[in-house]
Amino acid sequence: MNHNHQHQATDNLVKVIEVGPRDGLQNEKTIIPLTTKIELIEKLAKTGLTDIEAGSFVAPKWVPQVSHHRSLPTQRLIISQMADSSEILEYLLKYPPTSLNPIAYSFLAPNSRGLENALSILRAHPSSYQTFSPQSSPYEADESAVPDESAAEPTSDPPFIEMSVFAAATESFTQKNLNCDIATSLDRFREVITGAKAHGLRVKAYISVVLGCPFEGYDVDPRKVAEMACDLMEMGADEIDLGDTTGMGTAPRTAALLHAMQAAGIRNEDITMHFHDTYGQALVNSAVSLEHGIRRFDASVGGLGGCPFSPGATGNVSTEDLVYFFESLGMETGVDLDALCEVGEWVNGEIGKGNASSVGKALLAKRRREAEEA
């Protein structure tokens, strides 16, 4: 392959990471059936997505929601969600969804107990999953990052499995979300990252509330975020996922954060942006990030999601809106937008919510109108 062509091709590619099955559904106030979660993952796998956040291995006694002052139904809901993650991982290993490309499924493991729960399942199915090697990682700008147009046959190859940890940029949010201070949370994550890497697993490190905190407002120092990112990378994290959990981010603040990351030596290739659309700024902030050189973005099908610790925060930017936006700029996502819109409509119907994707609603309405006129 001509390396100049390779550079141009990869620079034009944007990787969209689907977080609906975990980050999206975890904030629903009713118990989502395990079959619905698995069906959602299977439908998403057929849309051309290559990265799907699938579940969370969180111990009930560690989660703030599961405590003495929470209602019994709420406790049952959280415990049910965590139990489902074990079954989801086992299902993906035994029956990998059919897709047009290899898919990486990530699972949150905030402490060593959560990691051990995940590893115990992986040990029971040693030949049923793949891990990334430095030479084959699709996150580097090599030939594996360029879509192979001839690879059009569906496949059920063993999935890639990744782990993730979830830090926060402010002390207040860390206490609410993790029941500890930032320093203690980083100590916990070191053990998780080291353990996961020892088993050949790629690790993503989230940092939430990077552009605004529900408890401390806009007083989030981008240099502090960059310092945390450096600490997590030094522990062995492969990627930093910067989360605007509250949707308080603006174009200037997003640019300032990315400049702080650059000044700290964090490469664009190692950064993923995660925007919520609470104030309608998610696409604007995505454009700023794109111009800065970021090529990895989280999104949630149908705009699923929110944040239990961030009152008023709406869902993640919808995957349909983000894919449409990037492709309108001439970028390539490799995602089938029509298929994605159908999934967004379906899952919101399954959980009894209105579709939060503007693009999804518009394209489906257009399709229905054309069908009526035909």
Image (cartoon, rainbow, N blue to C red):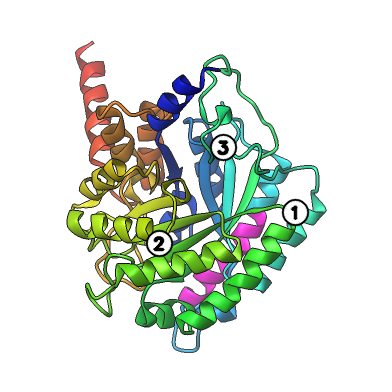
State the residue at coordinates (70%, 65%): 195
Give the amino acid type for the residue marked by disc 2 in the picture: Ala
Of residues 104 and 293, the one drawn nearer to the viewer in this rendering: 293
Q: Is residue 78 magenta?
A: yes
* Residue placed under numbered mark 2 in the picture: 264
Point out the stretch of residues depicted in magenta.
Answer: 72-87
Q: Mark 2 to mark 1: distance in Å?
A: 35 Å
Viewed as shown, does residue 25 lie left or right of 253? right
Of residues 237 and 217, the one drawn nearer to the viewer in this rendering: 237
Viewed as shown, does residue 152 lie left or right of 345? right
* Residue placed under numbered mark 3 in the picture: 138
Give the image quarter of residue 346: top left
Q: Earlier in the sequence, mark 2 or mark 3?
A: 3
Residue 124 position within the rendered picture, expressed as x and y whole percent measured from the top left: 81, 54
* Image quarter (top left, top right, bottom left or bottom right) of the C terminus: top left
* Residue placed under numbered mark 1 in the picture: 122
* Image quarter (top left, top right, bottom left or bottom right) of the N terminus: top right
Q: Earlier in the sequence, mark 2 or mark 1?
A: 1
Crowd tier of the residue under label 2, counting other residues whose Cα lies within 10 Å: few below 14, some 14–19, many 20 or above:
some
